[in-house]
Amino acid sequence: MVEAKDMRDDELVRRGRAALKGRHHKLANELLGEYCERRIREESPIPGAVLADYALSVAYLGDLKEGVEVCLRALALDRRNADAYAALARIHMLGRSRRKAVEALERGFAVSPRHAGLNSLRDELGVRRPPPLPFLPRDNRWNVALGKLFERFRSRRPKVA
């Protein structure tokens, strides 16, 4: 295998993202880390999307706090980057902070309502629907029974593509 130091920048990013997608987090971290180090040495800006991917690789290797910090730096560079919001939500999911993950998703959807990565994360998290009888508490037996009944009918409907 060619060493990361011998690769071109675009190849580092391409292979790093492919490794991240293939769940090879250590390799993704090495490749994207090399890219970021080069850009820092050259005093060139790092694209927010690449920084977010690097943050995700850091988080997958166990350093969630550093992953969040790097991802927030990516968002500071580009507040309209839906990929960075998706990465931040994924990191919060890794840290088992559902509330923060949902907040990141909501901010991401404000930027890009049809973003595929955000939609898949929302499907993973699940969406809490309002109770069928809003004037009763969510855990009231009528709300629970009606919610289960409605969900059964929802799941039987054919999906329209």
Image (cartoon, rainbow, N blue to C red):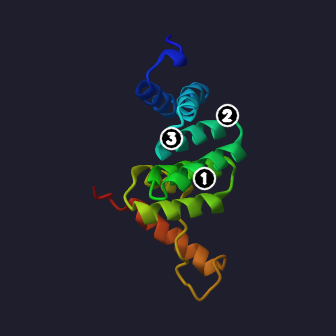
Callout 2: SS: loop
User: CA–CA distance between discs 1 and 2?
Assistant: 18 Å
Seen at 50% across and 70% down, the residue is: 149
* Residue assigned mark 3: 46
Q: Residue furthest front?
A: 43
Circle 3 sits in a helix, a strand or a loop, which is it?
loop
Q: Tell me residue 7's x, y (percent).
A: 46, 19
Q: In this rendering, would 117 be left or right of 141?
A: left
Task: State the residue at coordinates (39%, 62%).
Answer: 113
Residue wearing tag 2: 61
For residue 129, above or below residue 35: below
Q: Earlier in the sequence, mark 1 or mark 3?
A: 3
Identified by mark 1, the residue type is Leu
Position above or below: 19 against 125: above
Residue 148 position within the rendered picture, expressed as x and y whole percent measured from the top left? 54, 68
| Quadrant in the picture for residue 5 | top right
Q: CA distance from mark 3 to mark 2?
A: 21 Å
Residue 101, picture quadrant: bottom right
Could you say which disc has been placed on residue 87 in the image?
A: none
Residue under pointer 1: 72
Residue density around tag 2, few if under 14, some if 14–19, many if 20 or more, within 10 Å: few
- Measured in 3D between alpha carbons, the distance from the residue under mark 1 to the one under mark 3, in whole angstroms, is 13 Å
Tag 1 secondary structure = helix
Please report the residue visible at 53 percent of the width from the left and 76 percent of the height from the top.
Answer: 130
Q: In the rendered structure, which amino acid carries the disc numbered 2?
A: Leu
Where does the image place residue 70, in percent across and percent down from the top left?
62, 46
- Of the numbered discs 3 and 2, the one sitting upstream in the chain is 3
